[in-house]
Amino acid sequence: MTISRGVMWVMAIGLLAYGVSSAAEPKFADGVSVQRFVEVDTSVKPSHPQPKLPDGMQAHEDVVYCTVGDRALKLDLYVPKGDGPLPGVVLVHGGGWIGGNKESFRPMAQRIAAAGFVTATIEYRLATEAQFPAAVEDCKAAVRWMRAHAEAYHVDRDRIGAVGGSAGGHLVAMLATTGKSRLFEGSGGNADQRSDLQATAMMGAGVDQVTRAKETKNPIKSQLLFFGGKLDEKADVYAAASPITHISKDTPPLLFIEGEFDSPGQRYIEMRRQLDALGVPNQLIVIQGAKHGVWNSNPWFEPFTDNIIGFLKQTLVERHDK
């Protein structure tokens, strides 16, 4: 295992992480740099955590954050006790851009909110309804909505992050890498507000859709639906829809976090090389025994969520206060 640039930043955030491993770490693919391997009691029977609203936390669910045509898009917002202003976090569900729902991220949104963040788990237009870049535009509209309603919900406009899993991880990575460029803003309202992020956590995200398509024997159905065709037919779309295309020095700190059995780190080797060259803080955390998509299932829910909370505290609270 090698250590990438920014190791002191990684070590600092590591102190906040859930479940420090004392066991020997598994071997990872060549070129993969892992900053933390988190042990999990995998003998625990798998289950789904239930939403649990802590005392004093306000829930505002099914709030319309933008309307596109006659389609009203909604979010669930959780506001902890206190006057703030508090950092905000937008959570984006996965499902291959063709499935999933915001309710699946309610437990994670509530746990993050209990740690002192205003959180919103959002819905967006799926590929069966609208092709790329619609979903990216919707996510950016949600960030702008949070900034537009900052006073009402005690949000600090200058401290907003995002968390996403799988397709949702891809979408928040697109937000992170295009926030300052103003690409893919769409027409979802609050055009006077910014959509850039100050921190982003990705779970099992596809950051290079071109390479992903090239390395797959048969066309990926969700890519065909979301991008409107095969790679040789829509090469420019696949490239534009790849976060790796848009990396710059303005990209905020990134956390890549995924399961031991989800090809950990292999998706990000080239992206992290470019981030390191630009001096953009980034790290990879691997969760023991986890497969793709289990971040909202026990026994992996808390290790995923609490390591994300540690990252958000370091980037949106401690880094901001310095």
Image (spheres, grey):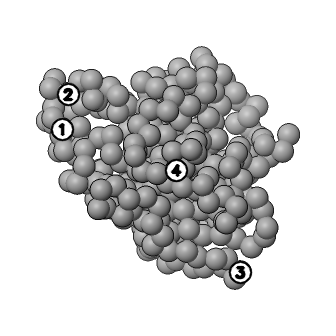
- Can you tell which of label 4 and label 3 is closer to the viewer? 4
* Res 228 label: 1
- Disc 4 to disc 2: CB gap under 8 Å: no
Q: What residue type is labelled 1?
A: Gly
* Label 4 or label 3, whichever comes before in sequence order: 3
Closer-to-camera residue (162/11): 162
Q: Residues within 10 Å of mark 4 (few under 14, many from 20)?
A: some
Q: List the single residue furthest toward the right.
A: 322
Contact flag, marks 2 and 1 (Cβ < 8 Å): yes
Asked whether the viewer can see residue 28, the reply is no
Q: Earlier in the sequence, mark 1 or mark 4?
A: 4
Q: Which residue is drawn at the image coordinates 78% and 41% (left, top)?
A: 319
Please state which of the two labelled residues, at mark 4 or mark 2, is closer to the viewer: 4
Q: What element carries label 4?
A: loop
Which of the numbered marks, if any, corresponds to residue 190? 4
Residue occupying the far bottom of the picture: 55
Judge whether 18 appears above or below 101 on screen: above
Distance from the alpha carbon under mark 1 to that under mark 4: 28 Å
Q: Seen in the image, is 309 located left or right of residue 189? A: right
Left or right: 303 with respect to 202? Answer: right
Observer-nearest of 86 and 284: 86
Which element is circle 3 on?
loop
Q: Residues within 10 Å of mark 3 (few under 14, many from 20)?
A: few
The amino acid marked with disc number 4 is: Asn
| Badge 1 or badge 3: first in the primary sequence | 3
